[in-house]
Amino acid sequence: MDKRPTPKNIDEYIAAFPPDVQEILQQIRTTIAKTVPDATEAISYQIPCFKLGGKNLVHFAAFKNHVSVYPAPRGVKEFKAELAAYMGGKGTVQFPLDRPLPTDLIVRIVNYRVNKLAEGGR
């Protein structure tokens, strides 16, 4: 991500990218919104975030060659093998822009995060 001004909302964030990337970002946004209709949109750490109960649920962002979703449960047994197929840091998963977006995986990550927040986690 380059030095862009902090967007006021997710629409403004998405609008700053080329049309093909905007489409992928909208797909992530829609997937999260449908998975957790009670979540609210925000900008946190200068990137799109969905909040639930006032806590950050999941973030997403676009970069030159990928989009990221975080936090990602890389260390969790049921996700470990599947997330190993994607680049990313300890708590991030990077989805390449030139491959289909695994919306089913995103849904499962979001549901995992909902459960973690319900248990009092972060």
Image (spheres, rainbow, N blue to C red):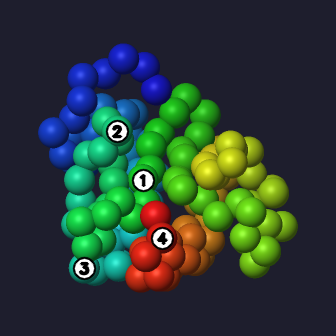
Q: Which residue is tagged 1?
A: 59
Residue 5 percent location from the top left of the image = 24, 23
Q: Which residue is located at x 52 percent, y 54 percent?
A: 70
Q: Is residue 102 positioned above or below 98 on the image?
A: below
Q: Which residue is located at x 61 percent, y 49 percent?
A: 92
Give, as a three-letter code, the residue at label 3.
Asp
Give, as a three-letter code, the residue at label 1.
His
Which of the two discs, 2 and 1, labels the residue nearer the N terminus? 2
Give, as a three-letter code, the residue at label 2.
Tyr
Closer mark to the observer between disc 2 and disc 3: 2
Q: Is residue 56 positioned above or below 25 on the image?
A: below
Closer mark to the observer between disc 4 and disc 1: 4
Q: Are marks 3 and 4 in contact (CB under 8 Å)?
A: no
Q: Which residue is tagged 4?
A: 121
- Asked whether 104 or 24 is in front, the reply is 104
Label 4 crowd (10 A; few <14 / some 14-19 / many >=20): few
Give the mark count. 4
Q: Is residue 23 left or right of residue 46?
A: right
Name the outermost residue toward the front.
120
Residue 19, label in figure: none
Q: Is residue 122 left or right of residue 87?
A: left
Q: Which residue is located at x 69 percent, y 48 percent?
A: 90
Label 3 crowd (10 A; few <14 / some 14-19 / many >=20): few
Which of the two discs, 3 and 4, labels the residue nearer the N terminus? 3
Q: Which residue is tagged 3?
A: 38
Give, as a three-letter code, the residue at label 4.
Gly
Residue 45, label in figure: 2
Q: Are marks 2 and 1 in contact (CB under 8 Å)?
A: yes
